Amino acid sequence: QVQLVESGGGSVQAGGSLRLSCAVSGNAVNQLTMGWFRQAPGKEREGVASTDRYDNKKYAESVKGRFKISKDNAKNTLYLQMSSLKPEDTATYYCAADPAFRFGGELTSSLYRDWGQGTQVNVSS
């Protein structure tokens, strides 16, 4: 079992930036398929970005060019750098991990075994 702890959420104005972190324990981040998901009130959880152990990546169309997923193997931490934030990016953001290899990762939540508790991001207009 992998433990995931997100941090870095907060409130920001539209056009601003935030960096989310996900501290990983129980396995090495570079051995896992990792993903960032978000869920807004009344909406389904959606995949935002994912990466595999070889750093191949996938992004949701809604965040391409604005968000960047990355890893720091030495710190065993996953990041999500979010720029040009929009009010529609407001959601609880979750980090997810799975030991199975999937090229580029996956943006489907049911394919992930382990989840963090989430961190709130609020973007005001």
Image (tube, helix red, strand yellow):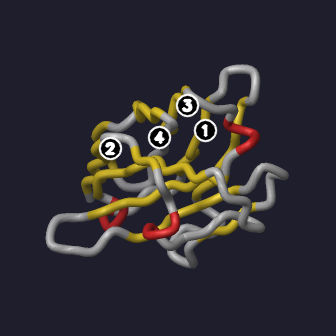
In front: mark 3 or mark 4?
3
**Numbered label attached to residue 47:** none
Furthest residue in direction top, as rendered: 74
Are circles 1 and 3 on residues that touch, CB within 8 Å? yes
Q: What element carries label 2?
A: loop
Say which quadrant the C terminus sits in: bottom left
Cα gap from disc 1 to disc 3, whole angstroms = 8 Å
Q: What element carries label 4?
A: strand
Residue at 57%, 28% in the rendered image = 26
Instruction: For label 2, count other residues whose C-alpha is less than 10 Å away and answer few (under 14), some (14-19) or many (20+).
Output: many
Residue at 32%, 43% in the rendered image = 118
- Tell which circle, 3 or 2, labels the residue nearer the N-terminal end: 3
- Residue type at the position of mark 3: Val
**Numbered label attached to residue 18:** 4
In front: mark 4 or mark 2?
2
Residue at 31%, 47% in the rendered image = 121
Q: Mark 1 highlights which residue?
A: 78
Cα gap from disc 4 to disc 2, whole angstroms = 15 Å
Are circles 4 and 1 on residues that touch, CB within 8 Å? no
Cα gap from disc 1 to disc 2, whole angstroms = 13 Å
Instruction: For label 1, count other residues whose C-alpha is less than 10 Å away and answer few (under 14), some (14-19) or many (20+).
Output: many
Q: Position of residue 123 (x, y in %)?
A: 30, 53
Are circles 4 and 2 on residues that touch, CB within 8 Å? no
- Residue type at the position of mark 4: Leu
Q: In this view, does 5 lie above or below 53?
A: above
**Numbered label attached to residue 118:** 2
- Tell which circle, 1 or 2, labels the residue nearer the N-terminal end: 1
Furthest residue in direction front, as rendered: 1
Furthest residue in direction bottom, as rendered: 61
Say which of 12 and 39 sits in front. Answer: 39
**Numbered label attached to residue 24:** 3
